[in-house]
Amino acid sequence: MSDRFNRLALYCGSATPADPRYIELARKVGTMLAERGIGVVYGGGKAGLMGAIAYAALEAGGEVIGVIPQALVDMEVANTDCTELHVVDTMHQRKQAFTDLSDGFVTLPGGVGTMDELWEAVSWAQLGYHNKPVGLLNAMGYYDGLVAFNRHMANTGFVREAHRDIVIVGETIEELLDKMAAFEPIQTIVQMRADDL
């Protein structure tokens, strides 16, 4: 597995939901990635699921690279225990760094920021700005509605047939990593003829 992925970008919430299963999930993911020799690239915070992933990976001896905007550093939410902490000026620079530093993307439960990161990774894959697997960890059915909506977009014709399966879905991190390891690059929009668009 680690032969395919040296590092994965992890997208998830900075919140701590009342249901403890979400933090437990984040810790499990962080620990498993470290045990498999896969580095974590994440948002650089110390709160919520983000912090749980980072600290679990560090405790298991893994590499953890945080990428955080200066504004959040100024709010004192940065995780200074990371193996590396990259401070950037904008959210766009943050997402570009996630793409540059990782071999793929895994989205855990989260909110608006997590959705922004996921859909930019999907959009960039469609366009051909990267050719890396985009994984969605649908633990506890959290993303059932999103998976159904993504299928609806494809069935209605707003997502091209070639891009129907960009989002790789798994209910466990083990299943998701196996599916991501089998990923084959898609035909991107920039590779298509005008008639295909």
Image (cartoon, grey):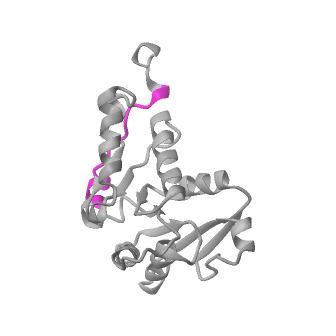
Span shown in magenta: 176-190
Question: Horizontal placement of 150 versus 56: left or right?
Answer: left
Task: Examine the structure image and report whether residue 97 is included in the region drawn in magenta.
Answer: no
Residue 41 vertical position relative to residue 195 in the rendered view, above or below: below
Q: Residue furthest top?
A: 195
Residue 156 vertical position relative to residue 59 in the rendered view, above or below: above
Residue 104: which quarter of the image?
A: bottom left
Q: Position of residue 23 (x, y in %)?
A: 40, 77
The residue at 33%/60% (across/down) is: 142
Which quadrant, please, contains the C terminus? top left
Which quadrant, please, contains the N terminus? bottom left
Task: Examine the structure image and report whether residue 178 is included in the region drawn in magenta.
Answer: yes
Question: Horizontal placement of 91 versus 1: left or right?
Answer: right
Q: Position of residue 71 (x, y in %)?
A: 73, 66
Q: Residue furthest bottom?
A: 59
* Residue 116 can be seen, yes or no: yes
Between 21 and 173, the residue placed more toward the observer is 21
Residue 2: which quarter of the image?
A: bottom left
Residue 101: which quarter of the image?
A: bottom right
Q: Residue furthest front?
A: 18
Question: Horizontal placement of 120 versus 160: left or right?
Answer: right
Q: Position of residue 3 (x, y in %)?
A: 36, 62
Q: How many marks?
A: 0
* Residue 165 can be seen, yes or no: no
Q: Position of residue 4 (x, y in %)?
A: 36, 58
The residue at 40%/63% (across/down) is: 108
